Amino acid sequence: MRQISNLQLMLTRRCQLRCVYCPIVKRAADMSARTLDRAVDFLFTSSAESLRLDFTGGEPFLRPDLVRRAVIRAEKLSAKTGKKISFYAVTNAIALKRELICFLRTRDILLELSLDGGRRRHNRFKRPAAPGLDPYVRTTAAIEPLRKAGLKHFVVMVATPENIRSFDSDFEHIYRLGIRNFDINYALGCLWEREALTGLKGAVARICVTHAGELRSGELCLGNFGKRREPALLNSEVMVDVDGSLHAMSEWMFESSCAGAAPPFQLGTVYGGGTLNGITMNKATAYYTLLSVSRGNARIKSIIMNNIKTGISFSTFVAGLKRRLFPDAAGGVE
């Protein structure tokens, strides 16, 4: 059984964007300071010696005050317990201001930036919640400040069956922006037919052939060659919702597909007196959660099974690419 050493905090359900493939229901709900404190404390109930606090949403940097509060509290607990602490944030970077960058630059934090290609392609899939916002312009404007501050970051490109034909050219566009750390995700919650999956594999293969030298030298890093857990749908991480309830990450994969329905179950709350060690999560429990989410819905169940098979097929393909690129180094670029 995998020891849980990280905790996802949904700081807010608000977001400036309405990404077409995001399953999270957006609404005006933020985590309270009291719940945040309890969530940080809950992470430190894990017996792991190295812990990670993850900020997500919605857009977590819409609440920079909560980010600061969580980081400071976690660092104090780290000093008290001797446990190592690091941080992770999933962000569109639109609300990432200079003051917060300065605060984070001395911390062990990794930023996951969501960027799908050039302006037209990115804005097609990252739709603004309010008129007048250009998602591509605002997100790419953050790249240079992050680089200058020395903040670790990488770009996640989400492939969908609709953007496969331009995927490698979209990759090249982002590469020209100076990004050298990538993760390629296939969109979850949609059906991947054989033709689309074959197209994605072909695009990734062309990217790797084009940049084989940079990949081997480490100048370019592809997170898919690292310690990525597949299939992605069977995510066994634990999330704290804005109200303090604890859930399996996989529970939220189809939240928007079950509009108005309550989550099938929760793992407890940060107020419940339990510990992170007391939560059992693995691929099997994630699968059980997904079956509960489907509630007999044949369409959702078919997508679940399709996404699991897609993940297995794609990860097998990526493993083969890795062996070809790094025949003399089993660890590749990890």
Image: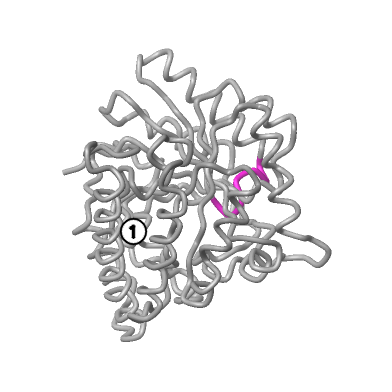
Residue hosting label 1: 232
> In the rendered view, does 154 fall on the left or right side of 247?
right
- Relative to 191, say whether 154 is above or below: above
What residue appears at the point 24 percent right and 56 percent down from the top-left corner? Answer: 320
Q: Quadrant of the C terminus?
A: top left
Q: Farthest residue to the right: give it.
A: 132
Within the magenta stretch, is there residue 64?
no
From the viewer's perspective, tell me whether residue 25 is left or right of residue 245: right
Going 45% across and 74% down the picture, which residue do you hit?
Answer: 261
Toward the viewer: 248 or 31?
A: 248
In front: 50, or 241? 50
The furthest residue to the left? 1
Provide the secondary structure element on which disc 1 rests.
Answer: helix
Query: How far across and down, in percent of the image, does residue 84 sit?
Result: 38, 21
Residue at x-position 33% and y-position 84%: 297
Which residue appears at 21% of the width and 47% of the height? 280
Q: Position of residue 81 (x, y in %)?
A: 36, 16
Looking at the image, residue 211 lies above or below residue 219: below
Categorize mark 1 by other alpha carbons within 10 Å: few (<14), some (14-19), many (20+). many
Q: Which residues are magenta?
A: 57-63
Q: Is residue 222 left or right of residue 149?
A: left
180 lies above or below 205: above
Question: Where residue 2 sits in the image (x, y, percent)?
Answer: 21, 42
Chosen colour scheme: one colour
Looking at the rendered structure, the kind of residue marked 1 is: Ala
Residue found farthest to the bottom: 298
